Image (spheres, rainbow, N blue to C red):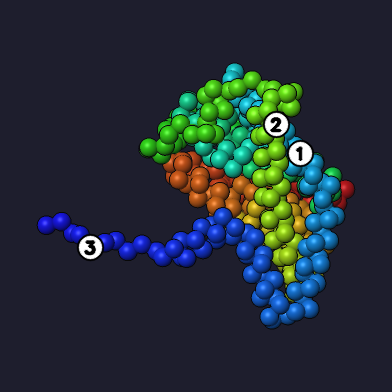
Amino acid sequence: MTDTTPSVQPSLPRRVWGRVWTDQRVWLTSALILAALLVLDPAQAGASAVFAGGALIKIAPYLLVSVSLAAWAGATGADNLIARAFTGAPLAMIGLGALAGAISPFCSCGVIPLIAALLAMGVPLSAVMAFWLASPLMDPSMFVLTAGVLGMEFAVAKTLAAFGLGLTGGMVVHLLARGGGLADPLREGIGNGGCGGARVRDPKPVAWRFWEDPARRSKFATTALGTALFLAKWLTLAFLLESLMLAWIPAETVTSVLGGSGLAPIATATLVGVPAYLNGYAALPLVGGLIGQGMAPGAGMAFLIAGGVTSIPAAMAVWALARPPVFGLYIALSLAGAFAIGLLFQLWTLL
């Protein structure tokens, strides 16, 4: 007998609000923070709004350059050059994969699907791991914003760290693979990478004079608007959180936990970076605020490296894609690399 009982569907208002929350949750979170402050601490609400607005104005020139770089890469197809990093001898592929990861600009669908495509196509895991570790840490837009928020020295150091982590991770995987380990890295049922993988399967030529093509001009405008809104919403939330951190967390507390030149602050920042990391762009003002409160520079670097590679959303995506041994190696390389990079950066700042 067929069950003719109608299924229960969410009411239209619930569906509409659910869609709004899904699409605009970052903006709504910022609005909810300000609304709560207006009720609980009106003076702080005004101070936080002024702080966030002033910080956005201060960083606007860097934001403009960052948006322009992302739009240019999408309109010209320059990000298709990534395909050339994965041809040649294994050791050369590791170096090129790390370099490509450290400088590559990708859309939101890019990194994880691209990894699936590379592995499904038979690219050695060592080269893929080099790209995989470096890619979340730096790109041209991130470099510009890092320089604007934390200074040029920090931006250059983080770029070198991304390349170094990718190169080291790729070499470790290469040595393990030569011993017969890490075969079949992908879970069963993982496809060839979708839209991100198309860049490698069928790379398109780069159109440097993109303004001559109406479709590419339109893509430039669309990408610029999307990137600007993406960065604006995350930076607004980050600056609001930074204002509250500066107002409510005593500098002595930050200094006692994450300050100093020993190993403990760097180790703590490495571990805290995994659950506390929000977004690569949003993390920059937070780390800047913490350093201003007394956080050791090496701990700040360790936080950014560990969080960028092993944040909970990123880790979940890797877990869904790779077999447990590969996932475990990815996490181990990330955390060990973040700690080592933080220590090296701390020593450099002391010279």
Looking at the image, do the residues carrying marks 1 and 2 touch, with CB atoms under 8 Å apart? no
In the image, is residue 239 above or below residue 327? below
Which residue is label 1 attached to?
Answer: 68
Looking at the rendering, which quadrant does residue 262 occupy? bottom right
The amino acid sitting under disc 3 is: Thr
Which residue is label 3 attached to?
Answer: 5
Q: Residue furthest bottom?
A: 40
Q: Nearer the viewer, residue 161 or 40?
A: 40
- Whole-Å distance between the Cαs marked 1 and 2? 13 Å
In the image, is residue 328 above or below residue 121? below
In percent of width and height, residue 141 lies at 74, 41
- Whole-Å distance between the Cαs marked 3 and 1? 54 Å
- The circle on residue 217 is 2
Q: Is residue 151 visible?
A: yes
In percent of width and height, residue 335 lies at 61, 49
Residue at image location 78% in from the left, 47% down from the top:
63
The amino acid sitting under disc 2 is: Arg
